[in-house]
Amino acid sequence: MTELVRMEGVVVEGDDRLLLDVPHLVLDSPRTAVIGPNGSGKSTLLRLLNGLTAPTRGQIAVLGTDVVENTAAARQLVGFVFSDPLAQLLLPTPLEDVRLSIPRLRGRAQAEAARTWLARCGAEHLAEASVYELSSGERQRVALASVLAAEPSLLVLDEPTTLLDRLSVRRLMRLLDSLAVPVLLATHDLEIASAFPRVLAVEDGRIVDDGPGGEVVPAYVRRVDAMDGSPDGPGVP
């Protein structure tokens, strides 16, 4: 399998505390999920991959590109989708925003390509709407179209289902399953994570479990239930 991500001796510190400690990590699965409590280091792990967060020390490579030494090149490789789509929608309408991601084309060709990506993400009918009048699910589809239009080599999504209803979540996951690009996704939705072939469980800034979703997720639930002191509870953190 193609090596997508490699981390060696990566440490992130902030405010006099450890945010993340990854002695060694190689990601080569086309679908990887990251789970863990709030503040565990999930977002920090993802943000290292395109330079949104810089390591205190250590080496990070995405598809062989050193993220620290060549952040601009890494950002060309990594498409990053935030949990709040308004954080990355820059222009008034979806069509304008997606066109911004396709600088290699101009004029009519650029507009047609943008509409194609919006259609792929189920948002073509929203092309001329104001992004401020869209629902959270609609904005998330537009944000995803904008990121995919740049043709990244790795798609990273930081809790993309946070603002979505169940139907929107299903549509988003069907879309992700249809993509050829590798996906790395952080989520609190354990049903989603269970279906991933590889899942990382992050707790207190460290990867404490790594394996198939069907094994890692139940083990994570047991740990959370034990910490809560409610072994007979619902098993959802």
Image (cartoon, rainbow, N blue to C red):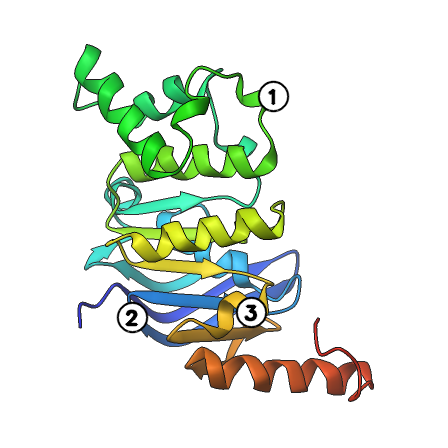
Q: Exactly how many numbered labels are in the figure?
A: 3
Nearer to us in this view, 16 or 128: 128
Q: Label 1 neighbourhood size at 10 Å, few (<14), some (14-19), many (20+)? A: few
- Label 2: element kind: loop
Closer mark to the observer between disc 2 and disc 1: 1
As measured in the structure, the alpha-carbon distance from the residue carrying label 2 to the one carrying label 3 is 19 Å
Judge left or right: residue 80 versus residue 85. Answer: left
Q: Position of residue 179 (x, y in %)?
A: 28, 52
Find residue 40 and name its label.
none
As measured in the structure, the alpha-carbon distance from the residue carrying label 2 to the one carrying label 1 is 37 Å
Q: Position of residue 160 (x, y in %)?
A: 52, 49
Q: To which residue does mark 3 refer?
A: 191
Find residue 29 and name its label.
2
Find residue 133 and name its label.
1
Amino acid type of the residue tagged 2 in the rendering: Ser
Is 53 placed above or below 16 here? above
Judge left or right: residue 105 versus residue 192. Answer: left
- Label 1: element kind: helix
Which part of the image, by quadrant, shows the C terminus?
A: bottom right
- At x 65%, y 68%, the residue is 37
